[in-house]
Image (spheres, rainbow, N blue to C red):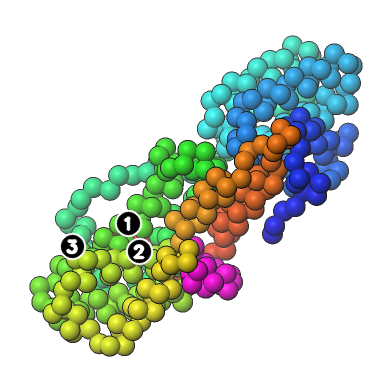
Amino acid sequence: MMVSLGHLAKGASLDDLIDSCIQSFDADGNLCRSNQLLQVMLTMHRIVISSAELLQKVITLYKDALAKNSPGLCLKICYFVRYWITEFWVMFKMDASLTDTMEEFQELVKAKGEELHCRLIDTTQINARDWSRKLTQRIKSNTSKKRKVSLLFDHLEPEELSEHLTYLEFKSFRRISFSDYQNYLVNSCVKENPTMERSIALCNGISQWVQLMVLSRPTPQLRAEVFIKFIQVAQKLHQLQNFNTLMAVIGGLCHSSISRLKETSSHVPHEINKVLGEMTELLSSSRNYDNYRRAYGECTDFKIPILGVHLKDLISLYEAMPDYLEDGKVNVHKLLALYNHISELVQLQEVAPPLEANKDLVHLLT
């Protein structure tokens, strides 16, 4: 669902945006207006200010409210910080500067003897949260596993193979968090972004595996049989709306190491080459992946996008608009556009694939 912020979308000062977030809560800590601004600000603020700097501004507001004897405002500020901690606790797990600034705030509140405020901004429960993010594992060459995967390929039907590949792809894709996309924007690369690195490594690995399976066969006839089977796998991936793995498989089949095998090509039926041509056209980068975008846009329910295309879109969007407008106001429209784009990708993770995978077979494929 696309988010809009009314008049604020035209631009606002950072102080006004923070104040609007704080005023989103009533005296009892309940939201008294839509949480859209809160979501956009707390997820996208790092485009214009670090998390620690944002919290420091909030601390300054808290100090001012204390000085002016405004207990109601102090309470609302703490409700805002509680919302931040509750909804985006991962930030406090990953950002050391933010954690240090939060400790400074907690010490200030404790020194003032505000017990309720202390409870609201307590972060001790963060360490008890489930932490399932795993660092990228560097895949080492394993000849024994390669032989097993080769046997697995021979004994699985195209539909089974496509389902297991889709299971792997979705498992990797759903681990990419909102923060991962944001880090990619800020750093313009996947370095120090293990979940995204792993997703890209999986895609590259599948493409290389496709090439290996074809090239490892000793005769043109046998290579053609493997080629045909992978085309059938690609058709199933297309039906499953798994465009990322489809791109990897077709990319592998179109690699120069395979396309130059003329004798092998002579054993591939015309209808198979026709399907390959259709798939290649679907995934073509011409007109900014226009064919893919049209097909992807028409898909409903479960689907896995071509990650590289959408990451490129994010960077283009990020670079096309300034962070600030001429009058010094934050370009809220930019934050909103990036938020909506990332949200669409993250929401895809909530739709489970229409299949079940054999975990033992999945283990052999990884």
Choose the circle earlier in sequence order: 1 or 3: 3
Amino acid at the residue labelled 2 = Ala
Residue depicted at x 35% and y 75%: 233
Residue depicted at x 37% and y 73%: 280
Q: Nearer the viewer, residue 58 or 137?
A: 58
The stretch of residues the image draws in magenta is: 290-305
Residue depicted at x 57% and y 60%: 348
In the picture of the structure, the residue carrying the numbered disc 1 is: 204
SS at circle 2: helix
Q: Nearer the viewer, residue 159 or 56?
A: 56
In the picture of the structure, the residue carrying the numbered disc 2 is: 248
Verify whether residue 65 appears in magenta.
no
Q: Nearer the viewer, mark 1 or mark 3?
A: 1
The quadrant holding residue 43 is top right
Q: Nearer the viewer, mark 2 or mark 3?
A: 2
In the picture of the structure, the residue carrying the numbered disc 3 is: 147
In the rendered image of this protein, does residue 69 appear above or below residue 256?
Answer: above
Q: Residues within 10 Å of mark 3 (few under 14, many from 20)?
A: few
Residue 276 left/right relative to 19? left
